[in-house]
Image (cartoon, helix red, strand yellow):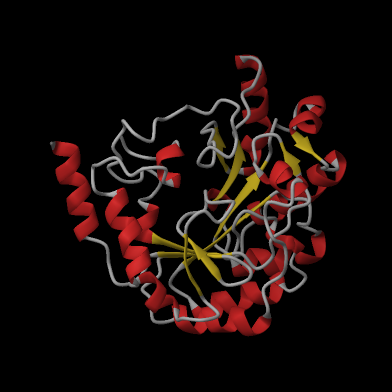
Amino acid sequence: MYKSWRAARKHRQRKDSPAILMIQTVSMCNAACTCCPYPELNRTKAIPHGMMSDELFDRIVDDARHFDLKRVSPYLNNEPFLDPKFASRLEKLKTAFPRAVLHVSTNGSRLEPELWKLVANSINKLHISAQGGVTDRTAFERNFLKMDYEKYVANVSGFLTMVAKGGYRLRAENIAINNVIDFPSAEALEKEIAYWKPFGVGINFGGFNSYSGAITIQARTFSSTSLPVYGCADKDRPIQAMHVLFDGACVLCCNDWTREVVVGNANERSLSDIWNGEEYRRHVAAIYSGRTIGNHMCVKCDQAIR
């Protein structure tokens, strides 16, 4: 009964605009992490590829100016620095949304020295993947496929050293190193923590996500017929966040890698119209209903509240 009441209350609290906006300016990634669905989906051509046009990017920015955004994240199921226009787009977003947190997540491979100062002066939150850790090169190369170990270490350590000196919009305490791969021992974990500690950054280790069943390893199996859903444990994304792909398609969640739930297209309608549209609201109502919702993507998700 309490779960149903809490879900209904959250549903009623959904505002007329999102608090978080995620924008995929390019769809590709140059890594092949074992904890990510991208390698297999890319191999089987299950996801389309491309780069967001300037016209669409500018339209999204103009639309979103009317939102009371708390966070803007120009990345979504990709490596954002593969976008050759990413640096200039960061500057546009910083100017358009001065009060919002400008957050980027990267695998570090394209965090080149010539970009360091621009990035550090544009964003104010950064997550860097380090799948498998850097203190064990073999584990790194086994889990962080297609990555150049030496280039990664040089890029990331050099950037973190620069930021630690201060004087930038981005501060060391607002940077986190992400790794969801388990370490083989407590000693290996402590060694990895000791490596990153001098940079003054945060460490996010653990938190495996099956991306709504897109990865089967370690994933839990849920029944679509017997388990009701009471909302989302990941920042209440259906009532907080909007996700726009490179071609304008708006998906319900960042875990929707295969576009299972598309609620509109930013080329055809304003972001506000999509967010407040019947299709979006119908899915949100179902997710926070406290009932079984058929073969919906949220039923398969690790983050669903049950």
For the point 61% across and 64% down, the residue is 24
Residue 277: x %, y % from top left: 35, 72
Residue 66's spot in the image, x, y percent?
A: 39, 81
Q: Residue at x 54, y 33 (%)?
A: 208
Residue under the point 71% across and 55% down: 162
Q: Is residue 303 visible?
A: no
Front-most of 160 and 246? Answer: 246
From this view, report whether residue 252 is shown above or below residue 195. Answer: below
Q: Residue at x 79, y 29 (%)?
A: 142
The vertical placement of 115 against 93, above or below, is: above
Image quarter (top left, top right, bottom left or bottom right) of the C terminus: top left
Q: From the viewer's perspective, is residue 281 above or below residue 303?
A: below
Q: Is residue 86 visible?
A: yes
Q: Is residue 283 left or right of residue 271?
A: left
Q: Left or right: where does residue 211 sit relative to residue 288?
A: right
Residue sitting nearer the eye, 240 or 205? 240
The location of residue 60, given as percent across then percent down, is 53, 78
Q: Is residue 147 left or right of residue 235?
A: right
- Quadrant location of the N terminus? top left
Above or below, 109 relative to 249: above
Residue 80 percent across, percent down from the top left = 68, 61
Looking at the picture, tell me which residue is in the foreground, 265 or 184. 265
Q: Nearer the viewer, residue 111 or 143?
A: 143
Q: How many numbered tags mark residues here?
A: 0
